[in-house]
Image (cartoon, grey):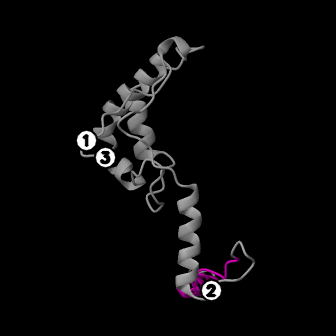
Amino acid sequence: MKNNPKKFFKCANSKMKTRSGVAELQCENGSVTKTDEQKAELLNQFFSSVYTVEDLVNIQTKAQADVQEVLSDIDFSSADIMKILSTGNLKAEKSPGPDNIHPSVLKECADVLASPLHLLFQKSLNEGFLPQVKVSGR
């Protein structure tokens, strides 16, 4: 900032500008959405059409006999996992991934999560698939 205040304020001002919402969207029939409600409805229809609801009660599992190659030469420890979670590429300002766990939670709880994650990863590598998870409350 001391060397080039103009550059700093240009960047700061660009971050403060508000951007308008979603641009106009084209419907399947070729018409263009005008209102926010139309845009929301069109996006809702699209995402509803591609979204699937997983059956968490009857999750299919692979038999161990289907495993063609076991990854036995991979060696890692709980300490390795804790180091990656606490100092790795996790960006705390980013959104949660497909697991719905926020990166800041992983980073802040690295010491507590390292051991259970190590067990889960090791079991997955040994058996050749992800262990079945029991989901409660659903």
The residue where tag 1 is placed is 136
Number of labels in the image equals 3
Q: CA distance from mark 3 to mark 1?
A: 22 Å
Specify whether 21 is left or right of 100.
right
Say what amino acid the circle numbered 1 marks: Ser
Q: Which residues are magenta?
A: 6-26
Q: Residue furthest right?
A: 30
The residue where tag 3 is placed is 109
Secondary element type, mark 1? loop
Near-viewer residue (130 or 74) = 130
Nearer-N-terminus badge (1/2): 2
Q: Quadrant of residue 22?
A: bottom right
Looking at the image, is 42 positioned above or below residue 19? above
Q: CA distance from mark 1 to mark 2?
A: 51 Å
**Residue 98, visible in the rendered structure:** yes
Nearer-N-terminus badge (2/3): 2
Looking at the image, is 42 positioned above or below residue 51? below
The residue where tag 2 is placed is 10
Say what amino acid the circle numbered 2 marks: Lys
Task: Name the spot of residue 123 as percent of width and height, x first.
Answer: 40, 21
Looking at the image, is 2 positioned above or below residue 128? below
Discs 2/3, front: 3
Task: Name the spot of residue 27 as percent of width and height, x first.
Answer: 68, 75
Q: Which residue corresponds to the image point at 60% horizontal and 14% vertical from the top-left?
A: 68
Task: Name the spot of residue 94 as percent of width and height, x first.
Answer: 48, 60
**Residue 76, visible in the rendered structure:** no
